[in-house]
Image (cartoon, rainbow, N blue to C red):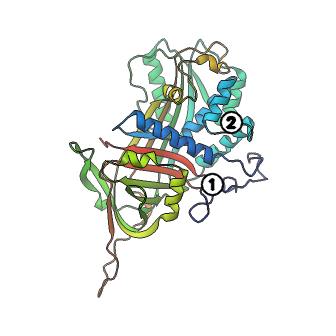
Amino acid sequence: MLLTPYACLLWLSTSGLWTSQAKDPDSDLSPRSQHRNLAPNNVDFAFALYKHLVASAPGKDVFISPVSISTVLAMLSLGARGYSREQLLQGLGFNLTEISEAEIHQDFRYLHSLLRGSNLTSEMTMGNALFLDHSLELLESFSADTKHYYGLEALAADFQDWAGTSRQINEYIKNKTQGKIVDLFSEQDSSAMLILVNYIFFKGTWTHSFHPESTGEENFHVNDTTTVKVPMMFQSRAIKYLNDSLLPCQLVQLDYTGNETVFFVLPVKGKVDTVIAELSRDTVQRWAKSLTHSQVDLYIPKVSISGGYDLGGVLGDMGIADLLNHPTHFTGITQNSLPKMSKLVHKAVLQLDEKGVEAAAPTGHGGGLNLAPKPVTIRFNRPFIVMVFDHFTWSSLFLGKIVNLT
């Protein structure tokens, strides 16, 4: 792992999760100023996008990788022109009077290298790929800059043969993710001539494993009338736990062996959207400071959580960038005029299983008088919230509202 001090945002024991940063003077990838970093902007954008998607899909699952989306949008700004370029970067939360565009792209390049090299015991694949019709040719400046800062790979395709192009894209993503993301495109037809795909897969190794022999099928209550069966993992140990006095929820924080940490949030029945509405940097910081080690009997579904979005329309609705309806704003991408029908597709997958380094010790039952407090039982058997952060950079890797585990 690149243990440079840049972006080492001190957490839990400090006054702020997203307020402490330093630079590495010996790295050509380090920021030029100590007060500049991506984490606060990225996390603010993450919650804004997450809440927008939740509001637009009531009663449905929402699952995204905000840091991946921020990265691909910053990259896309290299092809925007004029006010649209400023609008896109400002929509990501950047004040262009305080940080230059060059520094933004340099910082994203460095952030990406940190995330990709942060954990040798877990599986994480993330990247971007651009598929464009044979009739289109990328501008040399866009091709060079996106490859330098973001490692973008551009591939030609025959968009007149959508069946063949969709197979090409699906096969590419399948190979890049070692078979973890399949069938990205399933629709029978598309009039797109340019598709930018952003993808991420993560499967971590817990610092404390769940008990594999205790995993069993249990009910998950989607709503008052719908129940589905899911495999439910179990562990019992001292866990960071909070019964929130300000919001109607309980939560636990679990750590992976690398830099990833996970907040599982269980709202009171029917209060998921109430809790989501209050999510912010301040909320997460308050939780991090308030969590205490408690003896917990913890039940979490063993599932693969995924989400996929065509972000073009979503970003237009948010007033950030309308790639779908205003391609003239992105004339810095291709030699020819950018076709009206373009797609910006995001796919995120998080796999949860029992695998960990240390076995979670069962609750002790020593002889004589047992003075140990009774464990708190928390079952994630109804709609819940999951948030995965990289606590070295405090990037938001995943945000999810999990409603239906079928």
Left or right: 71, with 233 as reference point: right
Q: Is the residue 243 above or below the residue 198 in the image?
A: below
Q: Residues within 10 Å of mark 2 (few under 14, many from 20)?
A: some
Q: Position of residue 340 (x, y in %)?
A: 55, 14
Residue farthest to the front?
246
SS under mark 1: loop
SS under mark 2: helix
Q: CA distance from mark 2 to mark 1?
A: 19 Å
In the rendered structure, find residue 65 and report the number of the disc placed on it.
none
Q: Position of residue 326 (x, y in %)?
A: 57, 18
- Residue at the spot 64% in from the left edge and 29% down from the top edge: 87
Residue farthest to the bottom?
368
Quarter of the image holding residue 327?
Answer: top right
Q: Position of residue 179 (x, y in %)?
A: 44, 37
Please name whichever residue, 183 or 9, is drawn nearer the observer in this view of the structure. 9
Q: Amino acid at mark 2?
A: Tyr
Q: Amino acid at mark 1?
A: Met
Q: Residues within 10 Å of mark 1 (few under 14, many from 20)?
A: few
Circle 1 sits on which residue?
1
Q: Are marks 2 and 1 in contact (CB under 8 Å)?
A: no
Q: Can residue 151 be seen here?
A: no
Q: Nearer the viewer, mark 2 or mark 1?
A: 2
Circle 2 sits on which residue?
149
For marks 2 and 1 on the same chain, the one whose residue lies earlier in the sequence = 1
